[in-house]
Image (cartoon, helix red, strand yellow):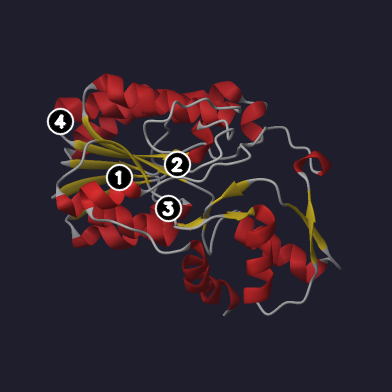
């Protein structure tokens, strides 16, 4: 199997680069070798690789920054996936693409299922939804994996931010009225490998850790897991305004992934226990 991995130096891409070789020969690109704002470069990269599977792990993921640069976010998250879809259709390749829980507005009380109507409340969410729709419109065979609250032992993410702050500040104040499921990049990459290896599936699947917590609950678990004693105080979202609005509830229901592809991720706490030692050693 010939695989083209896009975004190999990102949080998820870095993990994919270590797992996908088990499935076949991998050609990997990152932002230094492929500019996703350049449609011609995208087409050239795909045609040169002649892949059977394209895995797009690249994205504009700065949620707040997207509010001040919505066109760039739309170019990377909306337009580029559509071009990849067109090239995948041309090559008769499978396109695996990552989307987000932020395509929802957070007003639903229960976990979101794939058939719930998206209604993003941020520029980032709108750009990711545009990417989903562009891929579907391309007619290519695709797996769109919506995940949530991604963190890793490298890069920039909530886990590393909280650990740094907990070591430097007398106390932390973290929002306790937004709910989701923290999901490690390692779990996402391994589930992706499994999904590709099944040779089944088409369309959108929710792919996140099991369970539910708030940002405050996640921060508390990080601090305690690291053996730190820094107090973590709960605050409402109104006390921590950000440029981008976040959904209050973005918990994803992963039943479809399990029933159709036989894949189930562990509880978010288990994922955190796997990652923390990599950061603390």
Alpha-carbon distance for marks 1 and 3?
22 Å
Alpha carbon distance from label 4 to label 2: 23 Å
Are discs 3 and 2 less than 8 Å apart at CB? no
Q: Earlier in the sequence, mark 4 or mark 3?
A: 3
Residue highlighted by disc 4:
91
Label located before the other in sequence (3 or 2): 3
Inter-mark Cα distance, 1 to 4: 28 Å
- Disc nearest the viewer among 4 and 3: 3
Q: Earlier in the sequence, mark 2 or mark 1?
A: 2
Tell me: residue 65, above or below residue 261: above
**Front position among marks 3 and 2:** 3
The residue lying at 62 percent from left, 26 percent from top is: 69
User: In x, y percent, where is residue 97?
Assistant: 34, 39
Residue 254 drawn at (x, y percent): 37, 48
Residue corresponding to mark 1: 256
Disc 3: which residue:
12
Pointer 2 residue? 31
Q: Secondary structure at mark 3?
A: helix
């Amino acid at each position: 199997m010939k695989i083209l991995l896009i975004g190999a130096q990102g949080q998820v891409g870095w993990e994919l680069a270590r797992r996908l070789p088990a499935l076949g020969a991998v050609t990997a690109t990152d932002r230094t070798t492929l500019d996703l704002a350049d449609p011609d470069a995208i087409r050239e990269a795909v045609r040169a690789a002649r892949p059977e599977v394209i895995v797009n792990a690249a994205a504009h993921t700065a949620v707040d920054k997207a509010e001040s640069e919505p066109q760039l976010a739309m170019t990377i998250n909306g337009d580029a996936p559509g071009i990849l879809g067109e090239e995948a259709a041309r090559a008769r390749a499978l396109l695996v693409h990552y989307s987000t829980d932020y395509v929802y507005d957070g007003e639903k009380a229960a976990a979101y299922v794939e058939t719930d109507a998206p209604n993003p409340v941020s520029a980032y969410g709108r750009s990711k939804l545009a990417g989903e729709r562009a891929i579907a419109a391309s007619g290519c065979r695709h797996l769109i994996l919506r995940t949530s609250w991604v963190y890793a032992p490298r890069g920039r993410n909530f886990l590393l931010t909280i650990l740094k702050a907990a070591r430097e500040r007398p106390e932390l104040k973290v929002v306790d009225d937004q709910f989701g499921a923290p999901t490690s990049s390692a779990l996402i990459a391994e589930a992706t490998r499994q999904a590709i290896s099944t040779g089944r599936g088409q369309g959108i699947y929710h792919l996140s850790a099991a369970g539910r917590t708030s940002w405050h609950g996640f921060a508390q678990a990080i601090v305690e897991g690291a053996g730190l004693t820094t107090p973590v105080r709960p605050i409402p979202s109104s006390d921590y305004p950000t440029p981008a609005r976040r959904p209050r509830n973005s918990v994803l229901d992963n039943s479809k992934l399990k029933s159709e592809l036989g894949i189930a991720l562990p509880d978010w706490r288990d994922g955190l226990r796997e990652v923390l030692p990599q950061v603390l050693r």
